[in-house]
Amino acid sequence: MSAPKPFEISVPQAKLDAIRDRVAAFQWFPEPAGLPDWQFGMSTPVLKDIQSYWMETYDWRAEEAKLNEHPQFIAEIDGLPIHFLHVGGEAEGKRPLLLTHGWPGSVYEFYDSIGPLAFPSQHGGRAEDAFDLIIPSLPGYGFSGKPKAPLGQRATAKLWNTLMQDVLGYDTYLAQGGDWGGMVTSWLGLDHGTVDGKGGCTAIHLNMISLRPNPTVPQSDEEADWIKRAQAAMQLEGSYLMQQATKPQTLAMALMDSPMGTAAWVLEKFNTWSDLKGGDLFDIYTRDQLLTNLMIYLVNDAIATSVWYYAAFFGEGGATLPEGTRCETPTGFANFPGETVYFPPPRSWCERAYNITHWSEMSHGGHFAAMEAPDLFVDEVRAWANSLA
């Protein structure tokens, strides 16, 4: 373990030129005629739009400067360099909140929430609602180091607890996450929760339910109906998960050689998993946002090790708890209604896996909650944290 060292993003120009050259050289091929857009996966017109914007308008150096506006650090934990943002804010060390992203996201998901969460009085809020924010890049993602072999979510939770307690010196802390960040946060609550008020993670907040109770049999018609709907959703949309979990290296070899292929693989998920009611992908995100999140994978050659994370999930044993076990750390949950694939189980199911103390039904937003609906996300995190007092 090492002390944190200040870090600034500065991608070599040769790397940016190589990415640009491959984007420009992408060979287009026929798309199926007479079918609705997105029916076969990534939309060709949308990807052509992205390519044009990427080549003619997108400015990584301007986006890099924005990414560097917040303090960043690298600390070596168990031999692995971990990148993280650490924004002290108005809380002055008294209210640490650990935010964890998922796939195909990055720390960039939280950027629009950082100011309101860390400096609420500057954004129409109250100074007493401020948090100290710690936002790490998952192992093998973004600017964190790459593990030599797949490293999973439970192991990541252990790294995060070391980061919070031993590296940064927080005795207790709060944690929030969605997607893989929700799984990591769940393991923080289960394995590293406070005991008798002493040390560790005192409460967690999720925008995706991860852990499953044991036994996993439904105990009501509502639960049985959810299982059927969830299975149907995975049958329709879960092929990416099985590929990344069972044959990640095959996929990685294709994606690592093609920035445009990586863009298609990632942006199709942003389209499918976001709340697009009454609009389209570009009504929810700017092209700059979509490309900056994507570039964080490309400039670090991180897409390969990011998909390893799925194999590691099954290698750790999946999400079903040992029989008779529950995450007793107080747990808040926000149900964003645009979550099309990983929509939540009934509360009765969740309460067999978690100590649910806070539950919110949100008006809009989907899988990438902090990025899609930052104002709602900020309000919800504040409400959850204040409910713990």
Image: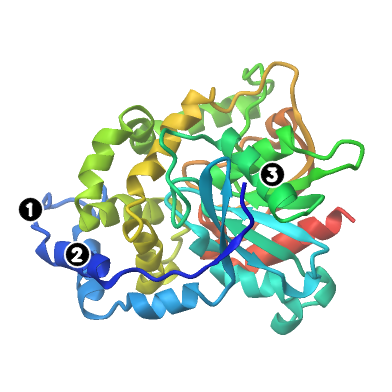
Going from the N terminus, do you reach mark 2 or mark 1 first? 2
On screen, residue 117 versus residue 262, left or right, reads: right
Mark 1 or mark 3, which has the lower sequence index?
1
Q: Is residue 320 above or below residue 337?
A: above
- Residue 333 visible in the picture: no
**Percent x, y of residue 113:** 61, 69
Q: Nearer the viewer, residue 236 or 305?
A: 305
Q: How is the image coloured?
A: rainbow
The residue under label 3 is: 161
Q: Nearer the viewer, residue 8 or 226?
A: 8
Q: Residues within 10 Å of mark 2 (few under 14, many from 20)?
A: few
Work out how far the residue at label 2 is from the one at label 3, CA to CA, in angstroms: 37 Å
Amino acid tagged 1: Pro
270 sits to left or right of 223 = left
Instruction: Tell me, for residue 30, which label it has, or none.
Output: 1
Name the spot of residue 66 as percent of width and height, x first.
Answer: 48, 77
Q: Quadrant of the C terminus?
A: bottom right
Residue position marked by numbered label 2 in the rendering: 18
Give the Cα separation between the discs numbered 1 and 3: 49 Å
Q: Nearer the viewer, mark 1 or mark 3?
A: 3
Residue 257, position as x, y percentages in the image: 19, 50
